[in-house]
């Protein structure tokens, strides 16, 4: 109780007599913590895989045990959760295989409501809304020499047969492995759905993802549901293994920043040196004085660290989110807890050198210092 | 002399803390100037294209070369030239940006790999970064038949302007005369890259290259080898800039005609996507140095205040002996400045000599991670930061001395 009283009086004196220096110390730790929060949020916490490829980690593919119709109620219920792409694999053939196809083979096509895939055309058009009996091939078809672009360019109109449906080739798109057809071909029953993919508007956490996979498996029994966290597990695991080192690096940067302001704490501590000598002369142990100094720094540092955390939480939506690279992976309560506790730890580490220098000095040396 | 001696004693007494401050400032300024240089390198393409494209633009890509064996004939090239020529005649089209290339074997080239000679349409020269030395073509070809070239790449950083380079192109002897050198930044525009989401970085390539300007003679030279002239980039891909007042239907009609040959992407989409990537570059490269710079400003301000506080008693004695307040402020600024000035000078030296060090192989920073772009403007960032820090120190000194007069300090110390 006595120590608490002394501590309280010391802090009060510092505020009254060295207000500007205390304020600068608080401001220094505050800005260092804000930097640490930013660094933690963009370099320690996030997965760069998820930051860069969020759409990929939000995709759940369901390989159906047997084909279903596009008008199936389950597809309608999935559309409420995200964007659904349906797939069909049928035999692709052409009357004159020399013109367009190297060989007759099974081919996968995809379709989605609205027919907007966001693809760019590398030849012709990708607008499937103009003709309900159209098909666009993918760039990989050309790269794998399944389809000849030169021949496509040479002829005015190319007709192919896909699963018995006659389609006009209108272009070649730049992405993916599958060709694209209008969704109306699935809606009118010309094609059935072999597999489907639902892309959620944002990614789920690993636990939420596992729950979602279970719900999909219940919805489509005996079908195979691919969990992106399992499918890309190796990438994510490799990133997780790097995280402790990145956290240590972040703490190192924080230590460097905090250390810059520790001379202010040392100055405040020196201001109390006369008092400390008196305490020692009347019988206080070295440890008591060191604990008092540590207590002063911890209280001041905790005030700054917590203020920085609250300011970050309060202004996250309006400012801090906008300067983040990985804004798709927001901070959660445990992140702030890790940040606050590791910041305080760093502050304690930063003041160790001058606490040691005090510890080493005898009462006589301290008395000489004061004089 | 007396003042210098006083200043020397003051510096000597806190040499360790000043040295730590010097190291901290060197590190912060180094990180800051490197971050700016990295961002500026990434922004060059965006700045050039944004300035060049006032109206709408289209990027045409023909990926058929990816699947062919590259055995193009002169007929293939002529067909594409006809397409480009017909587009040039279209009143809604303002400019066509094209490039083609041919390989040249240099006379003194021991390994015989040669160098790529890239021929650009005049409009395309606007997309180049500023030359490191020399000037752009007065004429594509000189009266003596030599072809003016800009040499690009770190290999040519010390080539004198006016140097004649003898070479062989498709078994034809030619003489190139260097009129300009481009090595910082080491990048030139080209249309070889392709992606479904094009961004402006894909329009630039690093050296070594020779750049020549399009005219009848240079075109004859380049088209003497149709297989290289057409492969990869040349005329397969090109940029169209429309007139500012071009009608939407005219643009669509051009796009529809080109879609029969390949794919088209609108420049506005490419610029938007590049702008988004540039913003990400800014956040990833600049935020940490900016934070550290901010923290160092606060630290510097604190050190200045503390420095005055600590010297206040000595100053009060000097004051009673005739030292003015202005000299007190000046002494403190000089005391702190001793750590800052060498740090800034070191940074100025680094930014001005970075490219020379890289060229001489002394330094390889930026060669592996990210390219850095330093020019004569770069040192001003560090100088600006230093001036700001000096002002901070000045404000801190004036603030403390305004609150505590030297006579008060002297009286208090006597109580």
Image: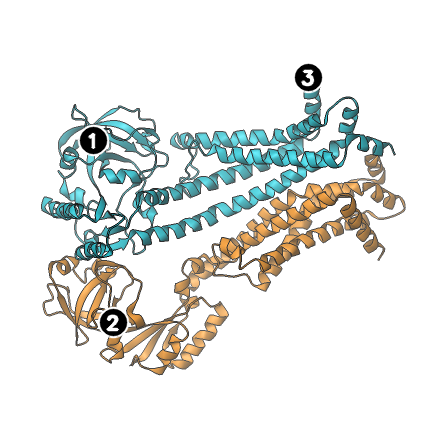
- Say which residue appears at 34% left-offset and 50% top-offset: B271
For disc 1, the marked residue is B140
Q: Where in the figure is residue B114, as x and y percent of width and height?
A: 22, 34
User: Same chain for marks 2 and 3?
Assistant: no
Chain letter behind tag 2: A
Whether residue B14 sits left or right of residue A325 in the image: it is right
Name the secondary structure under disc 2: loop
The outermost residue toward the top is: B1
Residue in the foreground of this view, choosing between A227 and A68: A68
Whether residue B271 sits left or right of residue B110 in the image: it is right
Disc 1 residue crowd, few under 14, some 14–19, many 20+, Cα 10 Å: some
Check whether the beta carbons of the residues at disc 2 and disc 3 lie within 8 A of each other: no
The outermost residue toward the right is: A282
Q: Label for residue A182?
A: 2
Residue in the foreground of this view, choosing between A83 and A293: A83
**Chain A: drawing colour:** orange
Rendered position, B32 above or below B4: below
Picture quarter with the N terminus of chain B: top right
Disc 2 residue crowd, few under 14, some 14–19, many 20+, Cα 10 Å: many
Rendered position, B63 above or below B375: below
Observer able to see residue B114: no
In the rendered image, what is the letter of the chain coloured cyan? B
User: Same chain for marks 3 and 1?
Assistant: yes
Instruction: Name which quarter of the figure residue B225 lies in.
Output: top left
Rendered position, B1 above or below B306: above
Check whether the beta carbons of the residues at disc 2 and disc 1 lie within 8 A of each other: no
For disc 3, the marked residue is B1
């Amino acid at each position: 109780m006595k120590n608490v009283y002394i501590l309280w009086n010391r802090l009060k004196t510092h505020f009254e007599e060295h207000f500007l220096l205390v304020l600068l110390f608080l401001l220094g730790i505050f800005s260092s913590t804000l930097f640490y929060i930013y660094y933690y949020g963009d370099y320690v916490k996030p997965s760069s895989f998820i930051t860069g490829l969020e759409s990929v980690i939000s995709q759940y593919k369901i390989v159906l045990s047997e084909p279903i119709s596009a008008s199936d109620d389950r597809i309608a219920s999935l559309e409420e959760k995200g964007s659904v792409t349906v797939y069909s694999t049928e035999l692709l053939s052409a009357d004159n295989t020399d013109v367009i196809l190297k060989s007759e083979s099974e081919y996968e096509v995809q379709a989605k409501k609205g027919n907007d895939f966001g693809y760019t055309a590398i030849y012709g058009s990708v607008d499937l809304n103009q003709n309900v009996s159209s098909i666009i091939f993918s760039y990989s078809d050309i790269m794998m020499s399944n389809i000849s672009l030169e021949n496509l360019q040479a002829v005015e109109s190319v007709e192919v047969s896909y699963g018995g449906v006659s389609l006009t080739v209108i272009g070649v798109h730049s992405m993916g492995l599958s060709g694209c057809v209008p969704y109306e071909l699935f809606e009118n029953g010309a094609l059935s759905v072999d597999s489907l993919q639902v892309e959620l508007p944002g990614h789920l956490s690993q636990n939420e993802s596992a729950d979602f996979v279970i719900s999909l498996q219940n919805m489509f029994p005996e079908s195979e549901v691919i969990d992106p966290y399992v499918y890309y597990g190796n990438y994510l695991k490799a990133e997780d293994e790097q995280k402790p080192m990145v956290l240590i690096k972040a703490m190192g940067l924080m230590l460097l920043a905090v250390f810059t302001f520790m001379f202010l704490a040392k100055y405040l501590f020196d201001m109390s040196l006369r008092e400390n000598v008196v305490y020692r002369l009347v019988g206080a142990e070295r440890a008591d004085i060191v604990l008092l100094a540590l207590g002063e720094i911890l209280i001041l540092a905790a005030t700054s660290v917590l203020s920085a955390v609250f300011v970050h939480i309060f202004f996250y939506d309006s400012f801090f989110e906008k300067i983040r690279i990985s804004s798709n992976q927001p901070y959660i309560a445990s992140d702030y807890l890790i940040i606050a506790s590791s910041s305080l730890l760093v502050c304690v580490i930063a003041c160790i050198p001058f606490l040691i220098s005090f510890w080493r000095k005898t009462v006589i040396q301290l008395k000489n210092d004061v004089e | 002399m007396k003042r210098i001696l006083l200043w020397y004693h003051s510096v000597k007494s806190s040499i360790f803390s000043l040295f730590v401050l010097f190291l901290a400032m060197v590190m912060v300024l180094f990180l800051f100037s490197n971050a700016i240089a990295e961002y500026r390198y990434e922004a060059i393409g965006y700045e050039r294209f944004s300035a060049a494209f006032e109206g709408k633009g289209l990027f045409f890509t023909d990926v058929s070369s990816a699947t062919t064996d590259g055995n193009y004939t002169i007929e293939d090239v002529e067909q594409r030239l006809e397409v480009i020529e017909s587009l040039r005649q279209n009143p809604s089209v303002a400019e066509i940006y094209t490039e083609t290339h041919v390989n040249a074997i240099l006379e003194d080239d021991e390994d015989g790999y040669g160098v790529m000679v890239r021929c650009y349409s005049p409009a395309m020269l606007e997309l180049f970064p500023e030359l490191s030395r020399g000037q752009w073509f007065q004429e594509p070809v000189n009266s003596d038949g030599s072809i003016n070239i800009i040499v690009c790449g770190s290999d040519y950083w010390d080539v004198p302007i006016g140097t004649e380079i003898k070479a062989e192109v498709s078994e034809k002897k030619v003489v190139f005369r260097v009129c300009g050198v481009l090595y910082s930044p080491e990048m030139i525009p080209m249309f070889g890259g392709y992606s479904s989401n094009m961004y402006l970085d894909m329009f630039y390539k690093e050296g070594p290259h020779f750049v020549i300007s399009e005219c009848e003679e240079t075109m004859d030279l380049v088209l003497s080898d149709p297989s290289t002239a057409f492969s990869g980039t040349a005329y397969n891909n090109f940029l169209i800039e429309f007139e500012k007042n071009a009608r939407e239907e005219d643009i669509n009609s051009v796009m529809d005609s080109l879609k029969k040959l390949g794919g088209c992407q609108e420049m506005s989409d490419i610029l938007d996507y590049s702008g988004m990537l540039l913003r990400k570059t800014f956040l990833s490269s600049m935020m940490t140095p900016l934070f550290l710079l901010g923290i160092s400003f606060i630290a510097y301000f604190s050190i200045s205040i503390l420095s005055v506080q600590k010297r206040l008693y000595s100053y009060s004695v000097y004051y009673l002996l005739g030292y003015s307040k202005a000299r007190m402020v000046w002494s403190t600024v000089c005391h702190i400045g001793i750590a800052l000035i060498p740090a800034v000078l070191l940074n100025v030296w680094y930014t001005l000599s970075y490219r020379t060090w890289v060229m001489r192989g002394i330094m390889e920073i930026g060669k592996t991670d990210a390219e850095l772009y330093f020019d004569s403007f770069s040192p001003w960032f560090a100088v600006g930061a230093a001036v700001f820090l000096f002002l901070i120190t000045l404000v801190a000194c004036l603030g403390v001395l305004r609150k505590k007069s030297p006579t008060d300090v002297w009286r208090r110390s006597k109580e």
